[in-house]
Amino acid sequence: MKRALNSPFLLCFLLGIVSHSWLGEASAITITGSNGRAVEFAGLKDATPKGVTAQLQPEGDIIGIPWEKLDLSALEQEHPRIYAAYLSSQKGETVPLNLGTFAPEKPEEMAAGTTPPRDRFPGWEDVDVGGATFAIQLPPGKARAILFVGIGDQGESLKYLTGFEFGTGLFGSLQKNESLALMTYSINYRDPDIRKMPDSAFAENGLADDVLEAVSKIAQKAERPELIDLPFLVYGSERFGSAVAYSFVQAKPEIVLAAVCAKGAFYRADPTPESAAVPMLFLWGEYSNNYEIWGSEHPATSALQRAAEMESNWTGGREFRGDSSPNLETEYFGKKYLQNVLSTRLRESRAEEGDASGPASWIEPYEREKGYIGTYSDASYVKIEESGPISDEGKTFVPNLTIAKIWKAYCEGSLEVEPGDRL
């Protein structure tokens, strides 16, 4: 019979009255209680919003143990996988643990769809959520942030990024230099009509929540609980990828350090004061007409104008004589932009209690007054002298002098990519 979380037997057990001398087996799972006592379990079944369900003895009853009866700090250090499940459970979901007596005897007995094969993308951890596959490539040490990347027109970003060892792929230098977890997806979208953009590309329709759920599940699977509390850098290019990137910022602005939207045109969600505060770079070609070909009413210029009155931290980058195709210069600028903003917004330690929590606790507000005003026509820039919106369509906000110099070179066609530095 399943026991309630507040059963008398459980309370006695947590007070250290129950003896567990019979549990001397290597399969026992030892967890530290809030009273400092180490307790052995025969098996752990699920992590629920209220607590963990467990067995004290191999043939015993399944009991519930409230989270407050466990030392969560010790749990994070001693059992990262269980702690990651705890974090997921606090979002209202029940996470299977299946440890000890609850472990399946054979791999094929695991519930269908719980976790994909670990070697599906070698070097990556992946999971299926909401009809999409998400994968993360982890750095050797602790990750500082999650670099969420979407590339391509059809939602198959995985094929551009997997197959590379850490630090060697399209985003290799940025991953390695900044110790980032690289995340991407395959949304399995196919439609011969390029004028149709599926709702699955837009984060406000549930994609953003799917991304966060995937992070939570991969954190548990890889025993890397720190992933759940990491802020995001976002990079999206082309029709589908840029739409995902833009809409993710609109849906979850509080957890985004910076974003880049390159050579896309489906920026349909209206900006908010919160999303306008996120530093975001839009890149397109001087001769780009993709928004006309794709039938979009929301190109980059439209998004920038809609956010202008909010004194946004958004930057427009118009490539000199550029077209609609991604290229090395565009990708290089995007990489440098993300790296630069990361250095100014990412706290080295979590904000003090009482400030923001979760991923937001690692993010510093952006100081707009340190920025510049750039003019597309001559690629010039001047320091911002006073606050106020930049409503002139021929001008744009540029976050700082380092980016202003790269912006100028991009807009006048003289940007030189460092040797061997590819996104």
Image (cartoon, rainbow, N blue to C red):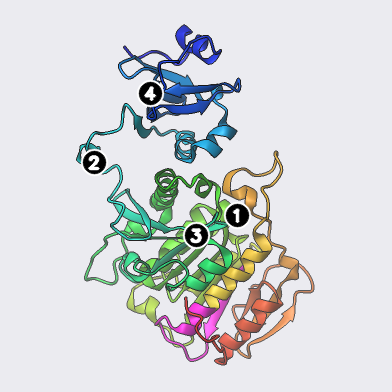
Q: Quadrant of residue 154?
A: bottom left
Residues at marks 1 and 3, CA–CA distance in whole angstroms: 30 Å
Where in the figure is residue 361, as x and y percent of width and height? Answer: 64, 48
Q: Amino acid at mark 1?
A: Glu
Residues at marks 1 and 4, CA–CA distance in whole angstroms: 48 Å
Q: Is residue 314 magenta?
A: yes
- Vertical relation: 145 (above or below) 35: below
Among the two numbered marks 1 and 3 on one chain, the one whose residue lies closer to the N terminus: 3
Among the two numbered marks 1 and 2 on one chain, the one whose residue lies closer to the N terminus: 2
Q: Residue at x 48, y 91 (%)?
A: 321
Among the two numbered marks 3 and 4 on one chain, the one whose residue lies closer to the N terminus: 4
Q: Which mark is residue 107?
A: 2
Q: Which quarter of the rendered picture does the N terminus lie within? A: top left
Q: Can residue 322 be seen?
A: yes
Residues at marks 2 and 4, CA–CA distance in whole angstroms: 20 Å
Among the two numbered marks 1 and 4 on one chain, the one whose residue lies closer to the N terminus: 4
Q: Secondary structure at mark 4?
A: loop
Residues at marks 3 and 4, CA–CA distance in whole angstroms: 33 Å
Query: Contact (CB < 8 A) between labels 1 and 4?
Result: no
Query: Contact (CB < 8 A) between labels 3 and 4?
Result: no
Residues at marks 1 and 2, CA–CA distance in whole angstroms: 45 Å
Q: Which mark is residue 274?
A: 1
Q: Which mark is residue 42?
A: 4
